[in-house]
Image (spheres, grey):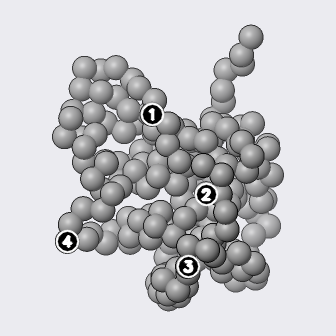
Amino acid sequence: MSREMIFVELTVHGLAVDPQGKSPVLLLRDSRSRILLPILIGEFEAKSILAELESRRAARPRTHDLATSLVGELGGRILSVEIYRLHKGTFLARLCIRTADGAEVRVECRASDGIAMALRSDAPIRVETEVLTAAHPLDGAEVDPSESSVGFVANDDAQGKTRLLAELAEMEPSDFGEFEM
């Protein structure tokens, strides 16, 4: 017998760079700032998420822009992204989409891709409570970005975003280590 999943809504609080591995880290936070969930993401996804947070539009659509537009042009709507499981250090997610005929479908995706698309659709980011328990998120009340050993960048820190983009641009694919696909 499976239990009903219970989700908590989180929002993007900022981006950071892991000082050891130099990998981009997406920081999600709950509305009362009690939970801060760090998720390692790729450079491409970090740039895409940062561009959306800054409302920067490219001359031509990027991959996440294209995928989001496809859903809309086909009469669908992204309802949310659900991060529903943590498996071997990887956050498993799915996009929840309402189709043109009103059906609700869930499409598997990487958490970072789902979040990038959710941001473009003003859709909520929902994280299952067991994922939060397994991931051991930081206590949001105890995190002071100015004192963090992680290269933290809040959404409203223009200079920090410039530094983060410069660090991301200097990274090589090998900086991310090896991942199981």
* Lower position in the chain sequence, tag 3 or tag 1: 1
Which of the numbered marks, if any, corresponds to residue 74? none
Q: Residue furthest top?
A: 1
CB within 8 Å, label 1 to label 4: no
Which of the numbered marks, if any, corresponds to residue 107? 1
Is label 2 in a helix, a strand or a loop? strand
The x, y position of residue 53, in whole percent, is 42, 66
CB within 8 Å, label 3 to label 1: no
Query: At x 29% / y 21%, what residue is drawn?
Result: 102
* Lower position in the chain sequence, tag 2 or tag 4: 2
Question: Mark 2 or mark 1: which is in front?
Answer: 1
Disc 3 marks a residue whose amino acid type is Glu
Q: How crowded is mark 1: few (under 14 residues within 10 Å), some or many (20 or more)?
A: few
Is label 4 in a helix, a strand or a loop? loop
* Distance (Cα) linking label 2 and label 1: 21 Å
Depicted 33 relative to depicted 125: above or below = below
Which of the numbered marks, if any, corresponds to residue 28? 2
Read off the residue under disc 3. Answer: 172
Read off the residue under disc 4. Answer: 59
